[in-house]
Image (cartoon, rainbow, N blue to C red):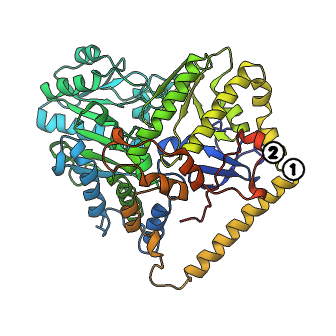
């Protein structure tokens, strides 16, 4: 573990005691060579897993061409990226095939862009008196950390001490359609909400809520804006979470997974009557829609275009839901909410806090993060195979039992020490050495494959973004085999994964790389090489 007794970083985060040095697929390795399953996925930014080879190939190819022009000039990937977004996401909005795109960088920027667009549309088209526009938002929301978006929040940690905040927002209980109806008036230009509230703990509204929102906003000529930065791009078993209720928003905000875990990429997609109101000088971004971001975004959208990732999330989500519901029935969790491959679980305070559980999971080889005290979000990469998912859920159960039986407090307090001690034995030292050798081999292979003075990209044919488009499957051998069984269109029809086949499809970790079986909680492990194609 890295020494964290002093840091030049401002204390804006309180991370778990692990320092990650290497990652691939669903796995990460710390600086001591210890292996973990990633069940956070960068808050859904890593939907396709770490270092997906199709995405890496797209990025590497673009890195050798041009990375930034600013929007003062066009570049050859910008229109392609916008059109790809329209092809994949446009039909899921009221903009349809005529949708427009505003490319940005972060999720917060996408939401700020949508706010500006609906306000200007309200003034210029709806005739709302200048500087009076209002937007209805939900309690428990998380749209970002800018001063405007912090003002939308009712979370003290996000909001307190950062005012004064921008006026013009009205908060109502999430899922309360009657409260939304009471909050709108002639000044209301939009309803802005997350279809599923991620930061709040994967909270789902009543089934009638989003269809009711669509009917209400259409009737009153109010824009319906869906913040799908966490919920979108496959996480819920569909391209957009709004599809779960057969609802088309007017605008959708996208981010996180759009950048493939490589670069920050975000966008607002939807109705041209709204986004077309933005003209030169009214909005922009130096890095928004840069060539590198566009190249990665195109490759990510290509992976989604077949529907295989969405289908896998829906199918794996059935196992996730069944196992978590069982833990609730046994009293190990107070509640669990699951949608696709995404879950929010609530701890019994008598067993400990959410962080206590995260520390117990860390000790046993699974990474997760607590939210709001007793809640933990689980969001593994969509490429996860069934044996890995079952192993992680076994570890969740084991950790909860340990906390219930009184072992959890000690395990949580000493988690960082225990992990550090693992590397002290010969096995740990060998694992750390193997990590260094792997990295050196990778660097040597890269140097050999790509001379410094090369004029043209030298990408192998099977690692191009086009190949990723054709295969649209995760990069690991196990995931490749699993994706062959997944249908390209209907997530509900996806066949159950064959556990035995997938177990065979994973390769054993080298003996020197294995962690102690007791620490992992199972003998069923897979090795996902950081250089595997």
| Residue occupying image coordinates x 41% and y 39% | 314
Which secondary structure, mark 1? loop
Percent across and percent down for residue 407 are 78, 24
Q: In the rendered view, does 438 fall on the left or right side of 257?
A: right
| Residue occupying image coordinates x 22% and y 50% | 100
Q: Which residue is mark 1?
A: 424
Q: In the rendered view, does 272 fall on the left or right side of 411?
A: left
Point out which mark residue 420 bears.
Answer: 2
Query: Which residue is nearer to you in this view: 195 or 514?
Result: 514
Percent across and percent down for residue 260 are 46, 54
Which secondary structure, mark 2? helix
Mark 2: few/some/many CA within 10 Å (<14, 14-19, 20+):
some
Q: Is residue 371 above or below residue 111?
A: above
Is the residue under label 1 in contact with that under label 2 (CB below 8 Å)? yes
Mark 1: few/some/many CA within 10 Å (<14, 14-19, 20+):
few
Query: Which residue is nearer to you in this view: 494 or 357?
Result: 494
| Residue occupying image coordinates x 33% and y 51% | 488
Residue 356 seen from this side: no
Classify residue 138 by image quadrant.
top left
Classify residue 519 by image quadrant.
top right
């Amino acid at each position: 573990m890295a020494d964290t007794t002093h840091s030049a970083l401002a204390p804006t985060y309180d991370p778990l005691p692990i320092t990650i040095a290497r990652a691939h697929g669903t796995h990460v390795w710390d600086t001591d060579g210890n292996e973990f399953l990633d069940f956070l996925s960068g808050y859904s930014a890593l939907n396709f897993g770490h270092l997906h080879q199709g995405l890496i190939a797209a990025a590497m190819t673009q890195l050798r061409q041009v990375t930034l022009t600013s929007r003062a000039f066009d570049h050859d990937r910008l229109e392609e990226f916008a059109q790809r977004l329209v092809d994949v996401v446009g039909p899921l909005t009221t903009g349809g095939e005529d949708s427009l795109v505003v490319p940005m960088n972060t999720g917060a920027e996408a939401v700020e862009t949508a706010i500006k667009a609906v306000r200007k549309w309200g003034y210029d088209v709806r005739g709302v008196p200048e500087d009076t526009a209002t937007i209805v938002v939900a309690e428990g929301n998380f749209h970002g950390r800018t001063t405007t978006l912090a003002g939308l929040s009712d979370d003290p940690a996000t909001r307190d001490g950062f005012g004064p905040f921008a006026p013009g927002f009205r908060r109502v209980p999430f899922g309360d359609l009657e409260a939304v109806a009471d909050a709108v008036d002639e000044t209301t230009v939009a309803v802005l909400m997350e279809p599923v509230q991620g930061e709040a703990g994967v909270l789902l509204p009543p089934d009638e809520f989003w269809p009711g929102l669509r009917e209400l906003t259409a009737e009153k000529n109010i824009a319906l804006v869906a913040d799908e930065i966490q919920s979108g791009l496959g996480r819920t078993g569909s391209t957009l979470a709004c599809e779960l209720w057969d609802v088309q928003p007017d605008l959708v905000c996208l981010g996180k997974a759009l950048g493939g875990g490589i670069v920050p990429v975000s966008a607002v997609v939807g109705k041209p009557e709204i986004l077309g109101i933005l003209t030169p000088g009214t909005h922009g971004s130096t890095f928004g829609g840069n060539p590198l971001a566009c190249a990665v975004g195109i490759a990510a959208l290509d992976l989604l275009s077949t529907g295989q990732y969405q289908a896998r999330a829906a199918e794996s989500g059935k196992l996730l839901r069944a196992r978590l519901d069982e833990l609730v029935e046994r009293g190990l969790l107070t509640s669990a909410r699951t949608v696709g491959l995404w879950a929010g679980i609530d701890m019994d305070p008598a067993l400990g806090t959410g962080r206590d559980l995260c520390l117990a999971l860390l000790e046993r080889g699974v990474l997760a993060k607590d939210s709001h005290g007793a809640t933990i979000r689980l969001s593994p990469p969509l490429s996860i195979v069934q044996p890995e998912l079952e192993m992680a859920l076994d570890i969740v159960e084991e950790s909860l039992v340990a906390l219930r039986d009184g072992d959890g407090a000690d395990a949580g307090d000493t988690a960082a020490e225990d992990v550090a001690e693992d590397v002290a034995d010969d096995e740990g030292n060998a694992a750390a050495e193997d990590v260094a050798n792997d990295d050196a081999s990778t660097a040597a292979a890269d140097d050999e494959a790509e001379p410094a003075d090369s004029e043209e990209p030298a990408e192998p044919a099977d690692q191009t973004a086009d190949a990723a488009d054709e295969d649209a499957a995760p990069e690991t051998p196990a995931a490749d085999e699993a994706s062959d069984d997944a249908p390209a269109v209907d997530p509900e029809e996806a066949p159950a994964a064959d556990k035995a086949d997938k177990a065979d499809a994973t390769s054993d970790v080298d003996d020197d790389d294995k962690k102690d079986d007791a620490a992992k909680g199972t003998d069923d492990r897979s090795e996902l090489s950081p250089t595997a194609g």
